[in-house]
Amino acid sequence: MNVIECRQAEKKYRGEHGILHADFTIRENTITGVIGRNGAGKTTLLKMLAGYLKPTGGEVKVFGERPFNSLKVSANSMYLDEFTVYSDSTPIGELFQHHRRFYPNWDQQLAVELLAYFSISQKAVRGSLSKGQRNTLHGIIGLAARCPLTIFDEPTTGMDASVRKDFYRALLKDYLTHPRTILISSHHLDEIEDLLEDIVLIDLGKIILHLPVEELKEFGMAISGPAAAVNNWIQHKTVIARKEEASGMVTVIVKNDFTAADKATAAGLRFSPVSASDMSIYLTNREKGGIDDVFNKRQYS
Amino acid sequence: MSLTNVSTANIIKKQYIHKMTSYRDAWKSLIITQLIALAISSFSTGGGTTSGDFYSINVTNYSVDVVFFFTVFWAFIASFLVTTNSYTYEDFSYVSNRTTSAVSAILFVASITTIAAIFTMLSSYFIFMVMYLTQDVNILYGSNTIGDFSEILSSFAAVWGYLLLASSVGYIIGALVQISRIFSLVIPVLIFLPGFMNVQVPILTDVVTFFTTETSVMMFTMKVLITAILLFMLGWLLSAKKEVRTW
């Protein structure tokens, strides 16, 4: 069953792209990573799915309903980011009680134990927590609520490295015992790669890829060698990125759609796999070159 | 994971409980407002002395009018604040749609207003109690506060009516300001400018006399109830299209 169905969904802001032509479906009980650079449109997409924002075009369906103003979607989904609004003067123990009332699957024991593990007091008020602790709290709430659709938008902002690891581990363990549909957005794919089944890659408001992580790992190949030989071989191939290196050597990332026979013709070139995380960076690179170019231009002008 | 089916009425009830228990600031501000007003009320509002050959009578008046006016102001501010984004957004952090959010907020405002009206009525007794305990004098009760049941009821209806009116006006203005910030400039100007410039705005004076000159308690209560319901519903309609947390 599909939990999420988007047909040409679109959200335009004044002067900004938001999300354009989003066309995808998410199956039940999967963990999907929504990956993209800052401002790519991840949050806009996720908030549209949660019913926070109203699409300006196309169709968005969650559990078969339009999420905007749907009580069914609200009861069965949860959207959490660092800005999620809870009363700052309410003690955390009481916040848990409120969630218990609203969410029938709420696991009070899990919430209390996770909170104790991350050394946050139940008596503390949310307003007194640090940014990392606040996100940890939101993460705990998202896990304990066991909503059929849970959306974590950049859940680990401000968390230290060990809390981040623990959080993702807790998420995976809880997912395995209580399978549900989870969306996680992040710009660090390497951090959540092992957790994910599918990836939605967004750039400039467009969904450029939606595929299993395993396929993304094999999506491209890095080919390096002397410039002339590489250039000769990559004719008629889909080039994704290109890096000039010193002494006439180049590395080119090409789409992995060539045959073994193709590969055999490339004498003296080195083929190496590209990790999913690197691949997502290459795919969302907006300019040829990099940050160095900005400075190089300044120096020599 | 199986989906949860929810009914609108059920969610409104849950949100109402949530608001009654977690909106501490509304309760705190009510208590502080009433205490300050009571402190001011414990100063006499006037009095006089009469004396004859063998006696002298010293009359000192006390009134809880200040408590009433302060509480009207509080009702306006408290319901204005309930419409602000941080409160509505919190509804959506739990389970909500625009209808349940607005209806539970209106029920909450109506409830705290009723409780504030009861507090205001009781404040008279508080003054009596303080005078009784601290002064060795005869106390002459006003007939509006300690009379028979129907008198208490009619003054309660008046207090409650004005509080409800203030809170419904606060709610609609809050809803307008949430639609556009321009209203936060336009509305105060519309209300206060005529007063400053000594201009009589016909509609405004008509509105005031519509409520204040009513002599029948029954009619007054009806007028207030209908006006408040209309204002609350308009506020609800205004919030029906709003997006949640665009940041």
Image (cartoon, rainbow, N blue to C red):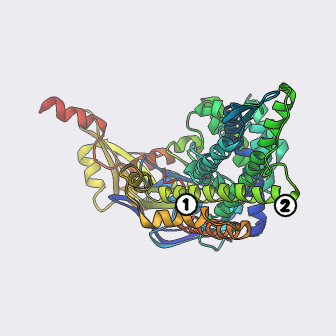
Q: Chain of mark 2?
A: B
Q: Position of residue A138 (x, y in %)?
A: 66, 43
Residue A212 seen in render: yes
**Which is more toward the observer, A257 or A170?**
A170
Is the C terminus of chain A in the top left, top right, bottom left or bottom right quadrant? top left
Query: Chain ID for label 1?
Result: B
Residue named by callout 1: B172
- Determine which quarter of the picture holds residue B98: bottom right
A284 relative position to B145: left or right: left
Query: Which residue does the numbered mark 2 point to in the structure image?
Result: B150
Quadrant containing the N terminus of chain A is: bottom right
The residue under the point 54% across, 42% down is A190
At x 65%, y 69%, the residue is: B223
Residue B112 — which label? none
| Left or right for A225, reference B163 | left
Residue type beneath disc 1: Ile
> Quick one: A123 or A280, which is closer to the camera?
A123
Note whether residue A247 is visible.
no
- Residue B105 occupies quadrant: bottom right
Q: Earlier in the sequence, mark 2 or mark 1?
A: 2
- Residue pushed farthest left? A301
* Distance CA(mark 2)–CA(mark 1): 32 Å
Label 1: which secondary element? helix
Label 2: element kind: helix
Residue at left 64%, top 30%?
Answer: A128
Coordinates of residue B245 in the picture (x, y in percent): 53, 53
Q: Amino acid at mark 2?
A: Ser
Residue A117: percent from the left, percent from the top? Answer: 77, 31
